[in-house]
Amino acid sequence: MLHNKILIFITPTLQNKELTIIFAGIIFSLTFKIKVMLKSTLPTIFCSFFLLYSCQWKGQPSKPTAQEEKPNTDYNPAFAGQTRITPVKTKTPYNIEILNTSLGKPWGIINLPDGRFLITEKSGFMNVVSTDGKQVSKISGFPKVDDKGQGGMLDVALDPDFKTNKIIYFSFSEPYEDGNHTAVAKGKLSSDLKTISEVKVIFRATPTYDGDKHYGSRLVFDKDGNLFVSTGERSDKQTRVYAQKTDNYLGKILKITKDGKPAPGNPFIGKSNYKPEIYAYGIRSPQGLALDEKGQLWDIEMGPRGGDEINLIQPGKNYGWGDVSYGIEYTGGKINNGTTQKAGTEQPVYYWDPVVSPSGVTFYTGNIEEWKNNLFIGCLSGEHINRIVIKDNKVVGEERLLLDQKERFRDVLNGMDGNLYGITDSGKLYKVSKK
Ligand SMILES: [Ca+2]
Protein backbone atom coordinates (compact mmCIF):
# COMPACT_ATOMS: atom_id res chain seq x y z
CA MET A 1 0.00 0.00 0.00
CA LEU A 2 2.40 2.52 -1.33
CA HIS A 3 0.10 5.52 -1.19
CA ASN A 4 -1.12 4.72 2.36
CA LYS A 5 2.48 4.88 3.55
CA ILE A 6 3.01 8.10 1.64
CA LEU A 7 -0.11 9.61 3.18
CA ILE A 8 0.92 8.72 6.72
CA PHE A 9 4.28 10.30 6.03
CA ILE A 10 3.13 13.53 4.47
CA THR A 11 -0.16 14.56 6.00
CA PRO A 12 1.06 15.42 9.50
CA THR A 13 3.89 17.46 8.06
CA LEU A 14 1.86 19.62 5.69
CA GLN A 15 2.06 23.10 7.08
CA ASN A 16 1.09 25.70 4.55
CA LYS A 17 -0.10 26.38 1.06
CA GLU A 18 3.37 26.29 -0.47
CA LEU A 19 4.03 22.86 0.96
CA THR A 20 0.63 21.70 -0.25
CA ILE A 21 1.53 22.77 -3.78
CA ILE A 22 4.90 20.98 -3.58
CA PHE A 23 3.22 17.84 -2.29
CA ALA A 24 0.52 18.13 -4.95
CA GLY A 25 3.33 17.99 -7.51
CA ILE A 26 4.83 14.92 -5.84
CA ILE A 27 1.42 13.27 -5.66
CA PHE A 28 0.75 13.84 -9.34
CA SER A 29 4.09 12.32 -10.29
CA LEU A 30 3.35 9.37 -7.99
CA THR A 31 -0.08 8.90 -9.47
CA PHE A 32 1.53 8.92 -12.89
CA LYS A 33 3.63 6.00 -11.68
CA ILE A 34 0.45 4.34 -10.39
CA LYS A 35 -1.05 4.89 -13.84
CA VAL A 36 1.91 3.12 -15.38
CA MET A 37 1.50 0.33 -12.82
CA LEU A 38 -2.25 -0.01 -13.32
CA LYS A 39 -2.22 0.74 -17.05
CA SER A 40 -5.49 2.58 -16.67
CA THR A 41 -6.60 6.21 -16.44
CA LEU A 42 -9.72 5.98 -14.29
CA PRO A 43 -8.05 4.67 -11.10
CA THR A 44 -5.34 7.27 -11.67
CA ILE A 45 -7.85 10.11 -11.58
CA PHE A 46 -9.45 8.59 -8.47
CA CYS A 47 -6.05 8.18 -6.77
CA SER A 48 -5.09 11.77 -7.57
CA PHE A 49 -8.27 13.24 -6.12
CA PHE A 50 -8.14 10.96 -3.06
CA LEU A 51 -4.52 11.82 -2.29
CA LEU A 52 -5.01 15.53 -2.87
CA TYR A 53 -8.21 15.65 -0.80
CA SER A 54 -6.46 13.83 2.06
CA CYS A 55 -3.63 16.35 2.01
CA GLN A 56 -5.80 19.44 1.79
CA TRP A 57 -7.49 19.19 5.17
CA LYS A 58 -4.53 20.52 7.15
CA GLY A 59 -2.67 23.57 6.05
CA GLN A 60 -5.89 25.42 5.35
CA PRO A 61 -6.12 28.84 6.95
CA SER A 62 -9.18 29.29 9.16
CA LYS A 63 -12.31 31.03 7.94
CA PRO A 64 -13.45 34.07 9.95
CA THR A 65 -15.68 31.87 12.14
CA ALA A 66 -15.83 28.14 12.92
CA GLN A 67 -19.46 28.18 11.78
CA GLU A 68 -18.31 28.77 8.20
CA GLU A 69 -16.20 25.59 8.25
CA LYS A 70 -17.22 21.96 7.94
CA PRO A 71 -16.32 19.77 10.96
CA ASN A 72 -14.29 16.58 10.46
CA THR A 73 -16.56 14.46 12.65
CA ASP A 74 -20.16 14.28 13.82
CA TYR A 75 -19.12 13.50 17.41
CA ASN A 76 -21.34 15.06 20.06
CA PRO A 77 -19.61 17.33 22.56
CA ALA A 78 -19.85 16.42 26.25
CA PHE A 79 -21.56 19.72 27.09
CA ALA A 80 -22.94 22.79 25.34
CA GLY A 81 -20.23 25.26 24.37
CA GLN A 82 -17.40 22.71 24.21
CA THR A 83 -16.76 23.41 20.52
CA ARG A 84 -17.72 25.79 17.68
CA ILE A 85 -18.72 28.49 20.17
CA THR A 86 -20.53 31.66 19.14
CA PRO A 87 -18.10 34.11 17.53
CA VAL A 88 -17.39 37.47 19.16
CA LYS A 89 -15.97 40.63 17.60
CA THR A 90 -13.63 43.21 19.13
CA LYS A 91 -15.18 46.70 19.27
CA THR A 92 -12.08 48.62 20.38
CA PRO A 93 -10.04 49.91 17.41
CA TYR A 94 -6.49 48.54 17.35
CA ASN A 95 -3.30 48.88 15.29
CA ILE A 96 -1.30 46.07 13.75
CA GLU A 97 2.43 46.73 13.15
CA ILE A 98 5.23 44.50 11.93
CA LEU A 99 8.37 45.43 13.89
CA ASN A 100 10.80 42.99 12.29
CA THR A 101 10.64 40.61 9.33
CA SER A 102 13.93 38.70 9.63
CA LEU A 103 14.03 36.81 12.90
CA GLY A 104 14.67 33.45 11.25
CA LYS A 105 12.58 30.72 12.84
CA PRO A 106 11.46 32.17 16.18
CA TRP A 107 9.72 29.77 18.59
CA GLY A 108 9.31 31.44 21.99
CA ILE A 109 9.09 35.09 23.04
CA ILE A 110 9.29 36.58 26.54
CA ASN A 111 10.02 40.02 27.96
CA LEU A 112 13.25 40.95 29.72
CA PRO A 113 12.78 43.20 32.80
CA ASP A 114 13.71 46.30 30.74
CA GLY A 115 10.95 45.63 28.19
CA ARG A 116 13.17 44.18 25.46
CA PHE A 117 12.30 40.77 24.04
CA LEU A 118 14.12 37.51 24.45
CA ILE A 119 13.23 35.40 21.41
CA THR A 120 14.40 31.83 20.83
CA GLU A 121 15.56 30.76 17.38
CA LYS A 122 14.83 27.19 16.41
CA SER A 123 18.28 26.47 14.97
CA GLY A 124 19.86 26.77 18.42
CA PHE A 125 20.26 30.23 19.94
CA MET A 126 18.34 33.28 21.19
CA ASN A 127 18.09 36.93 20.20
CA VAL A 128 17.65 40.01 22.34
CA VAL A 129 15.36 42.34 20.41
CA SER A 130 14.77 46.01 21.22
CA THR A 131 11.25 47.25 22.02
CA ASP A 132 10.91 48.79 18.53
CA GLY A 133 12.09 45.52 16.96
CA LYS A 134 15.03 47.14 15.15
CA GLN A 135 18.07 46.13 17.22
CA VAL A 136 18.75 42.41 17.30
CA SER A 137 21.69 40.87 19.15
CA LYS A 138 22.48 37.20 19.30
CA ILE A 139 23.22 35.27 22.47
CA SER A 140 25.70 32.45 21.91
CA GLY A 141 27.02 29.56 23.96
CA PHE A 142 24.00 27.25 23.89
CA PRO A 143 24.32 23.46 23.70
CA LYS A 144 23.80 21.69 20.38
CA VAL A 145 20.16 21.16 19.41
CA ASP A 146 18.55 18.72 16.98
CA ASP A 147 16.50 21.11 14.86
CA LYS A 148 15.05 18.61 12.41
CA GLY A 149 11.27 18.84 11.94
CA GLN A 150 9.63 20.40 14.99
CA GLY A 151 12.79 20.28 17.11
CA GLY A 152 15.36 22.91 18.00
CA MET A 153 15.78 25.69 20.55
CA LEU A 154 12.24 25.95 21.87
CA ASP A 155 10.92 27.86 24.90
CA VAL A 156 12.57 30.15 27.45
CA ALA A 157 11.68 31.44 30.92
CA LEU A 158 13.41 33.89 33.24
CA ASP A 159 14.33 32.84 36.74
CA PRO A 160 11.94 34.60 39.15
CA ASP A 161 15.12 36.31 40.51
CA PHE A 162 16.53 37.07 37.04
CA LYS A 163 17.14 40.75 37.85
CA THR A 164 19.79 39.74 40.37
CA ASN A 165 20.98 36.29 39.19
CA LYS A 166 20.65 36.58 35.33
CA ILE A 167 19.60 32.92 35.15
CA ILE A 168 17.34 31.68 32.36
CA TYR A 169 15.74 28.27 31.73
CA PHE A 170 15.25 26.93 28.24
CA SER A 171 13.93 23.84 26.52
CA PHE A 172 15.34 22.20 23.44
CA SER A 173 15.49 18.92 21.56
CA GLU A 174 18.74 17.42 22.75
CA PRO A 175 20.48 14.98 20.42
CA TYR A 176 21.38 11.76 22.19
CA GLU A 177 22.78 8.57 20.64
CA ASP A 178 20.52 7.74 17.67
CA GLY A 179 17.65 10.01 18.71
CA ASN A 180 16.68 13.01 20.80
CA HIS A 181 14.46 14.11 23.67
CA THR A 182 13.05 17.30 25.14
CA ALA A 183 15.57 18.71 27.63
CA VAL A 184 15.35 21.62 30.04
CA ALA A 185 18.53 23.51 30.87
CA LYS A 186 19.51 26.55 32.88
CA GLY A 187 22.35 28.99 32.40
CA LYS A 188 23.59 32.45 33.31
CA LEU A 189 23.53 35.35 30.85
CA SER A 190 26.49 37.72 30.75
CA SER A 191 25.73 41.29 31.82
CA ASP A 192 25.87 42.43 28.15
CA LEU A 193 23.45 39.59 27.23
CA LYS A 194 25.83 38.33 24.54
CA THR A 195 26.70 34.90 25.97
CA ILE A 196 25.35 32.21 28.25
CA SER A 197 27.60 30.29 30.64
CA GLU A 198 27.32 27.69 33.40
CA VAL A 199 24.81 25.81 31.22
CA LYS A 200 23.43 22.73 32.93
CA VAL A 201 20.74 20.36 31.69
CA ILE A 202 18.40 19.95 34.67
CA PHE A 203 15.81 17.61 33.16
CA ARG A 204 15.51 15.13 30.29
CA ALA A 205 12.10 13.92 29.11
CA THR A 206 13.01 10.34 28.38
CA PRO A 207 12.73 7.87 26.73
CA THR A 208 14.93 9.18 23.94
CA TYR A 209 13.33 8.58 20.56
CA ASP A 210 14.45 8.89 16.96
CA GLY A 211 11.75 11.26 15.73
CA ASP A 212 11.27 14.94 14.90
CA LYS A 213 7.81 15.82 16.26
CA HIS A 214 5.80 16.68 19.38
CA TYR A 215 8.42 17.99 21.79
CA GLY A 216 5.87 20.12 23.68
CA SER A 217 8.16 22.03 25.98
CA ARG A 218 6.56 25.28 27.05
CA LEU A 219 8.02 26.53 30.34
CA VAL A 220 5.96 28.39 32.93
CA PHE A 221 7.02 29.29 36.47
CA ASP A 222 4.35 28.77 39.12
CA LYS A 223 3.92 31.32 41.92
CA ASP A 224 5.78 28.93 44.25
CA GLY A 225 8.95 29.23 42.13
CA ASN A 226 8.72 25.78 40.55
CA LEU A 227 8.61 25.18 36.83
CA PHE A 228 5.83 23.62 34.76
CA VAL A 229 7.13 21.83 31.67
CA SER A 230 4.91 20.37 28.95
CA THR A 231 6.09 17.40 26.91
CA GLY A 232 4.66 15.81 23.78
CA GLU A 233 4.26 12.11 23.06
CA ARG A 234 6.56 12.24 20.00
CA SER A 235 3.68 11.74 17.57
CA ASP A 236 4.27 8.25 16.22
CA LYS A 237 1.96 5.31 16.92
CA GLN A 238 4.63 3.46 18.90
CA THR A 239 5.26 6.41 21.24
CA ARG A 240 1.63 7.57 21.54
CA VAL A 241 1.03 4.84 24.15
CA TYR A 242 3.50 6.53 26.50
CA ALA A 243 1.00 9.36 27.12
CA GLN A 244 -1.25 7.01 29.13
CA LYS A 245 1.65 5.38 30.99
CA THR A 246 3.08 7.06 34.06
CA ASP A 247 6.54 5.46 34.16
CA ASN A 248 7.96 7.87 31.54
CA TYR A 249 8.02 11.56 30.64
CA LEU A 250 6.29 11.66 27.23
CA GLY A 251 2.88 13.31 26.84
CA LYS A 252 2.92 14.94 30.26
CA ILE A 253 2.63 18.14 32.24
CA LEU A 254 5.57 18.03 34.65
CA LYS A 255 6.43 20.21 37.63
CA ILE A 256 10.06 20.47 38.66
CA THR A 257 12.21 22.59 40.92
CA LYS A 258 14.87 24.98 39.58
CA ASP A 259 17.30 22.05 39.84
CA GLY A 260 15.08 19.65 37.92
CA LYS A 261 13.90 17.64 40.92
CA PRO A 262 10.23 16.71 41.45
CA ALA A 263 8.41 19.79 42.78
CA PRO A 264 7.29 19.38 46.41
CA GLY A 265 3.58 18.54 46.54
CA ASN A 266 3.49 16.78 43.15
CA PRO A 267 0.56 14.32 43.05
CA PHE A 268 2.45 11.05 42.48
CA ILE A 269 5.45 11.39 44.78
CA GLY A 270 6.11 8.05 46.49
CA LYS A 271 3.71 6.09 44.26
CA SER A 272 5.18 3.10 42.44
CA ASN A 273 5.16 3.16 38.62
CA TYR A 274 4.72 6.92 38.62
CA LYS A 275 7.51 9.34 37.81
CA PRO A 276 7.44 11.86 40.67
CA GLU A 277 7.87 14.85 38.32
CA ILE A 278 4.46 14.16 36.70
CA TYR A 279 1.75 16.72 37.42
CA ALA A 280 -0.80 15.50 34.83
CA TYR A 281 -0.75 13.01 31.93
CA GLY A 282 -2.60 11.85 28.81
CA ILE A 283 -1.30 14.83 26.81
CA ARG A 284 -0.59 14.92 23.07
CA SER A 285 1.31 17.92 21.64
CA PRO A 286 1.17 20.70 24.23
CA GLN A 287 2.63 23.81 22.62
CA GLY A 288 0.68 26.23 24.79
CA LEU A 289 0.86 26.56 28.58
CA ALA A 290 -0.24 29.56 30.65
CA LEU A 291 -1.46 30.57 34.11
CA ASP A 292 -4.65 32.64 34.34
CA GLU A 293 -5.21 35.50 36.76
CA LYS A 294 -6.33 33.05 39.48
CA GLY A 295 -3.15 30.99 39.05
CA GLN A 296 -4.94 28.10 37.28
CA LEU A 297 -2.84 26.24 34.70
CA TRP A 298 -4.15 25.85 31.14
CA ASP A 299 -2.72 23.51 28.51
CA ILE A 300 -3.51 24.10 24.86
CA GLU A 301 -2.58 21.15 22.71
CA MET A 302 -2.62 20.24 19.06
CA GLY A 303 -4.93 17.33 18.49
CA PRO A 304 -5.21 15.00 15.56
CA ARG A 305 -7.58 15.96 12.72
CA GLY A 306 -10.41 17.84 14.44
CA GLY A 307 -9.27 17.57 18.05
CA ASP A 308 -7.20 20.58 19.13
CA GLU A 309 -7.92 21.12 22.84
CA ILE A 310 -7.97 23.62 25.69
CA ASN A 311 -7.50 21.87 29.03
CA LEU A 312 -7.67 23.18 32.57
CA ILE A 313 -4.90 21.23 34.27
CA GLN A 314 -5.53 19.74 37.72
CA PRO A 315 -2.82 17.82 39.55
CA GLY A 316 -2.93 14.04 39.15
CA LYS A 317 -5.53 14.02 36.35
CA ASN A 318 -5.50 12.10 33.06
CA TYR A 319 -6.37 14.14 29.96
CA GLY A 320 -7.17 11.18 27.78
CA TRP A 321 -4.72 11.05 24.88
CA GLY A 322 -4.27 8.62 23.06
CA ASP A 323 -7.44 6.79 24.25
CA VAL A 324 -9.88 9.66 24.04
CA SER A 325 -10.18 12.39 21.40
CA TYR A 326 -12.70 14.45 19.44
CA GLY A 327 -10.41 14.18 16.44
CA ILE A 328 -9.69 11.41 13.99
CA GLU A 329 -6.38 10.17 12.61
CA TYR A 330 -4.65 12.33 9.98
CA THR A 331 -5.37 9.49 7.59
CA GLY A 332 -9.06 9.49 8.47
CA GLY A 333 -9.48 6.48 10.81
CA LYS A 334 -11.14 6.63 14.22
CA ILE A 335 -9.08 6.88 17.39
CA ASN A 336 -9.82 4.08 19.87
CA ASN A 337 -13.07 3.28 18.00
CA GLY A 338 -14.21 6.88 18.25
CA THR A 339 -14.03 7.22 22.05
CA THR A 340 -14.69 10.86 22.98
CA GLN A 341 -15.50 10.39 26.67
CA LYS A 342 -14.15 7.91 29.17
CA ALA A 343 -14.43 7.50 32.95
CA GLY A 344 -11.22 8.51 34.70
CA THR A 345 -10.24 11.02 32.01
CA GLU A 346 -10.83 14.75 31.91
CA GLN A 347 -12.80 16.41 29.15
CA PRO A 348 -11.26 19.38 27.35
CA VAL A 349 -12.83 22.70 28.31
CA TYR A 350 -12.98 23.35 24.56
CA TYR A 351 -11.99 21.72 21.31
CA TRP A 352 -11.67 22.88 17.71
CA ASP A 353 -13.12 20.96 14.81
CA PRO A 354 -11.77 21.71 12.26
CA VAL A 355 -8.38 22.39 13.79
CA VAL A 356 -6.50 25.69 14.09
CA SER A 357 -3.13 24.15 15.19
CA PRO A 358 -2.71 26.10 18.43
CA SER A 359 0.82 26.99 19.57
CA GLY A 360 2.01 29.55 22.18
CA VAL A 361 -0.61 31.19 24.41
CA THR A 362 -1.07 33.98 26.93
CA PHE A 363 -3.82 35.43 29.10
CA TYR A 364 -4.19 39.06 28.10
CA THR A 365 -3.48 41.69 30.74
CA GLY A 366 -2.91 44.68 28.44
CA ASN A 367 -4.49 47.98 27.45
CA ILE A 368 -7.61 46.82 25.60
CA GLU A 369 -10.28 46.52 28.28
CA GLU A 370 -12.57 44.04 26.49
CA TRP A 371 -9.62 41.62 26.01
CA LYS A 372 -8.70 41.46 29.73
CA ASN A 373 -8.14 37.87 30.91
CA ASN A 374 -9.05 36.44 27.50
CA LEU A 375 -6.84 33.63 26.24
CA PHE A 376 -4.81 34.54 23.14
CA ILE A 377 -3.47 31.66 21.06
CA GLY A 378 -0.97 31.76 18.21
CA CYS A 379 -2.31 29.45 15.50
CA LEU A 380 -0.21 27.72 12.84
CA SER A 381 -2.31 26.10 10.09
CA GLY A 382 -5.17 28.42 11.14
CA GLU A 383 -2.93 31.42 10.32
CA HIS A 384 -4.37 33.78 12.93
CA ILE A 385 -4.30 34.75 16.59
CA ASN A 386 -7.26 33.12 18.30
CA ARG A 387 -9.04 35.02 21.10
CA ILE A 388 -10.99 32.88 23.54
CA VAL A 389 -13.37 34.46 26.05
CA ILE A 390 -13.62 32.37 29.22
CA LYS A 391 -16.20 32.78 31.98
CA ASP A 392 -16.27 30.55 35.07
CA ASN A 393 -13.83 28.17 33.33
CA LYS A 394 -16.16 27.74 30.33
CA VAL A 395 -15.54 29.12 26.84
CA VAL A 396 -18.20 31.67 25.86
CA GLY A 397 -16.74 33.26 22.72
CA GLU A 398 -14.09 32.91 20.00
CA GLU A 399 -12.59 35.47 17.64
CA ARG A 400 -9.97 35.02 14.90
CA LEU A 401 -7.64 38.02 14.75
CA LEU A 402 -5.06 39.00 12.09
CA LEU A 403 -6.46 36.45 9.60
CA ASP A 404 -5.65 38.84 6.75
CA GLN A 405 -1.93 38.60 7.62
CA LYS A 406 -1.83 34.94 6.49
CA GLU A 407 0.91 34.08 9.00
CA ARG A 408 1.62 31.03 11.12
CA PHE A 409 1.73 32.50 14.65
CA ARG A 410 4.13 30.43 16.78
CA ASP A 411 3.90 32.32 20.07
CA VAL A 412 2.22 35.36 21.59
CA LEU A 413 3.27 37.64 24.47
CA ASN A 414 1.65 40.16 26.77
CA GLY A 415 4.21 42.92 26.47
CA MET A 416 5.23 44.86 29.58
CA ASP A 417 3.94 47.96 27.78
CA GLY A 418 0.39 46.57 27.66
CA ASN A 419 0.54 45.60 23.98
CA LEU A 420 0.19 42.16 22.46
CA TYR A 421 3.13 40.72 20.51
CA GLY A 422 3.33 37.72 18.22
CA ILE A 423 6.09 35.87 16.36
CA THR A 424 5.59 33.95 13.13
CA ASP A 425 7.25 31.03 11.37
CA SER A 426 8.22 33.47 8.59
CA GLY A 427 10.41 35.40 11.09
CA LYS A 428 8.15 38.37 11.80
CA LEU A 429 7.52 40.20 15.06
CA TYR A 430 4.01 41.68 15.29
CA LYS A 431 2.70 44.32 17.67
CA VAL A 432 -1.03 44.76 18.32
CA SER A 433 -1.83 47.95 20.22
CA LYS A 434 -4.90 49.98 21.20
CA LYS A 435 -5.56 52.79 18.72
CA1 LIG B 1 -7.44 15.27 25.85
Image (cartoon, rainbow, N blue to C red):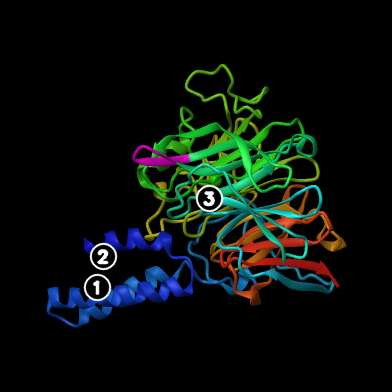
**SS at circle 2:** helix
Which secondary structure type mostly characterizes the magenta part of the structure? strand
Residue 3 badge: 2
Q: Which corner quadrant of the image does residue 427 belong to?
A: bottom right
User: Separation of disc 2 and disc 3 at Cα?
Assistant: 35 Å
Q: Which residue is mark 3?
A: 124
**SS at circle 1:** helix
Q: Local crowd at mark 1 within 10 Å, few (<14), some, or many (≥20)?
A: some
> What amino acid is at disc 3?
Gly
Q: Position of residue 242 (x, y in %)?
A: 43, 36
Give the number of the mark in front: 1 or 3.
3
Q: Which residues are magenta?
A: 175-181
In the image shown, does 330 or 385 lie closer to the viewer? 385
Q: Position of residue 181 (x, y in %)?
A: 45, 40
> What amino acid is at disc 2?
His
In the image shown, does 231 or 103 lie closer to the viewer? 103
Left or right relative to 105: residue 337:
left
Q: Which corner quadrant of the image does residue 51 belong to?
A: bottom left
Residue 252 seen in this snapshot: no
Q: Quadrant of the C terminus?
A: bottom right
Give the number of the mark in front: 2 or 3.
3
- Of labels 2 and 3, earlier in sequence is 2
Q: Position of residue 384 (x, y in %)?
A: 63, 68
Magenta-colored stretch includes residue 374: no
Q: Local crowd at mark 2 within 10 Å, few (<14), some, or many (≥20)?
A: some
Circles 2 and 1 in contact, beta carbons < 8 Å: yes
Q: Is residue 415 above or below residue 32?
A: above
